[in-house]
Amino acid sequence: MTNIVTNIAETVESHGNNAAIGFQGEETSYEEFWAQSGAFAAALEEHGLGEDDRVAIYLPNVPPFPIAFHGTLRAGGVVVPMNPQYKAREIGHLLADSEAKVVVTLADLVPFVEEVRDDTDVEHVVSVGGDADGATPFEEFLVHADPEITDRADDDVAVQPYTSGTTGQPKGVQLTHENLTSNATAASELIPDGIRPDDKQLGVLPLFHIYGMTVVMNATLFNGGTYYAVPEWDAQNAVSIIEDEELTIMHGVPAMYNDVINQPDAESFDLSSLRLCGVGGSGIPTEVLRTFEDLYDVEIYEGYGLTETSPITHFNSPIDGRRVGSIGKTVPGVDSKVVDENFEEVTAVESGPIDEDEADLDGITGEIVVSGPNVMNGYYRLPEANEEAFTEADGTRWFHTGDVGYHDEDGFFYVVDREKHVIVTGGYNVYPREVEELLFEHDAVADAAVVGIEDERRGETVKAYVVPTPEADVSPEEIKEYCLENLAEYKHPREVEFVEELPRTTTGKVQKFKLEEREVAAE
């Protein structure tokens, strides 16, 4: 039996009295959590739902999310996680495309579901945190019984998240029980002593996102630790929870670590209970990493992955050592390589990270491709997209990540940038991340993003959006001069614009397409 829920059942047997979930000062034991997820599974079965039926979870990080998540899997269903910041127009596509029959959401969000309900297969809406017209309150929906775990095969779909849809409509990613089980297990074993029953993990990464779902929630629950659910990111609140509850593990995106070190009282925070921090979602600027580590005496380990890979493919494991600037080595059980446009493997550099200013990046970089038990079955009902996403070579099915990078002879991989973000200016390739790294080293820069803009002579040129620090006394011209002093002439930003904040996704990624749209609108 492969059902991912069997891992939770084993935890209940071994650590039933441990706290499974912490939330706003209250804790739920594993035995209580198991009973609640069973009650949700029984409710689905009573309504005639089971194997392969889709259940959409449209919630922030609150206890009903893991309850509904594991209850759905226990009944043999498929979870469709949805961003609680989405409005009716956005969830309409996800619900219709996935054919979800149940939606679990906040009472305040029920009207968005009702607005699109007639165009979907939704039969039941379950409200959390109050009553709402057209919905059944969560506690009333539950049927207090202890159903058996529904058998599922390795390649049966367990979760169907949707890609962020920065280009075109979001695509449903079919992740199987094996995909998620193998990756949560790998995440558990990549740190010293693994995730332990006495570990307490900060659950601020959104659960609708694969990073928060697998690396934080499931990896913790598989091992008897405590998952502390935090509905939204606020640096001061997160720090308070770490201090008050003495949390031991924090995973976040680069923007979160940057927010913490830019708090006015950052030097007074006591994060000594943390034994490890992880970062993913995008590359963390070296300056942000170093500053956080110097302030709090805890190391940040960078990893890499995608929704389509469950997510982890690479990690700077403390067990194998780390290289700052690297996404780490390929995790056990997963294969990866760097290939050119002909799918020929690119030769590794002797040792990284290299000086990207002096190296011929075009000669050592290529697209990172991966294969392994963590790689999705494919996109839901999108055969053409699947053809583009995979290449069969030497009997192996390789997934195209779309990321440009290189690797070294010691097995460490490095991401230079997304293929679609590379700026071609006057025939030269400029990788935005390199310019962003330099900007973060400037004392007056709190946040920054670099995009390509149209240029009559060069085709494209470089523009930097900069969020100055509150006390900054600097001009855009000074930032340009600073970059020109430290980068090749063709790489420095021709334009610098100061902004109050950068547009980001819920998971902290800069939405560069919004910056690019802003440029088009200004023309």
Image (cartoon, rainbow, N blue to C red):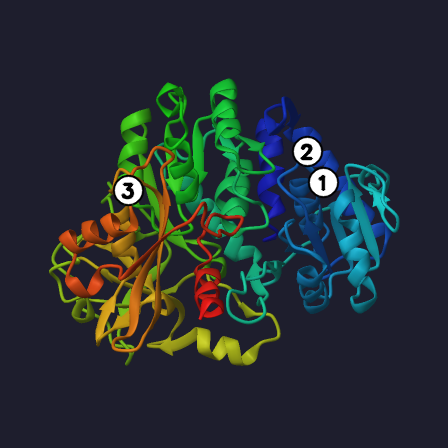
Viewer-proximal residue among 471 and 40 = 471
Q: CA distance from mark 2 to mark 3?
A: 53 Å
Please, is residue 354 above or below residue 421 in the view? above
User: Label 2 is placed on what type of residue?
Assistant: Phe
Give residue 207's position: percent from left, percent from top.
58, 45
**Residue 348 visible:** no
User: Label 1 is placed on what type of residue?
Assistant: Ser
Give residue 477's position: percent from left, percent from top.
25, 52
Assess disc 3: are there few (<14), some (14-19) or many (≥20) residues with their C-alpha within 10 Å of its C-alpha. Answer: few
Mark 2, residue position: 33
Give residue 202's position: percent from left, percent from top.
50, 32
Assess disc 2: are there few (<14), some (14-19) or many (≥20) residues with their C-alpha within 10 Å of its C-alpha. Answer: many
- The image quadrant that residue 79 belongs to is bottom right
User: Label 3 is placed on what type of residue?
Assistant: Val
Viewer-proximal residue among 103 and 89 = 89
- The image quadrant that residue 217 belongs to is top right
Q: Horizontal placement of 321 versus 18: left or right? A: left
Q: Secondary structure at mark 2?
A: helix
Give residue 475's position: percent from left, percent from top.
29, 46
**Residue 405 visible:** yes
Q: Are marks 2 and 1 in contact (CB under 8 Å)?
A: yes
Q: CA distance from mark 2 to mark 1?
A: 6 Å
Mark 1, residue position: 37
Between circles 1 and 3, the one closer to the viewer is 3
At a point 27% along the width and 28% down the height, the residue shown is 294
Mark 3, residue position: 474
Q: Are marks 1 and 3 in contact (CB under 8 Å)?
A: no
Q: Secondary structure at mark 3?
A: loop
Q: Secondary structure at mark 1?
A: helix
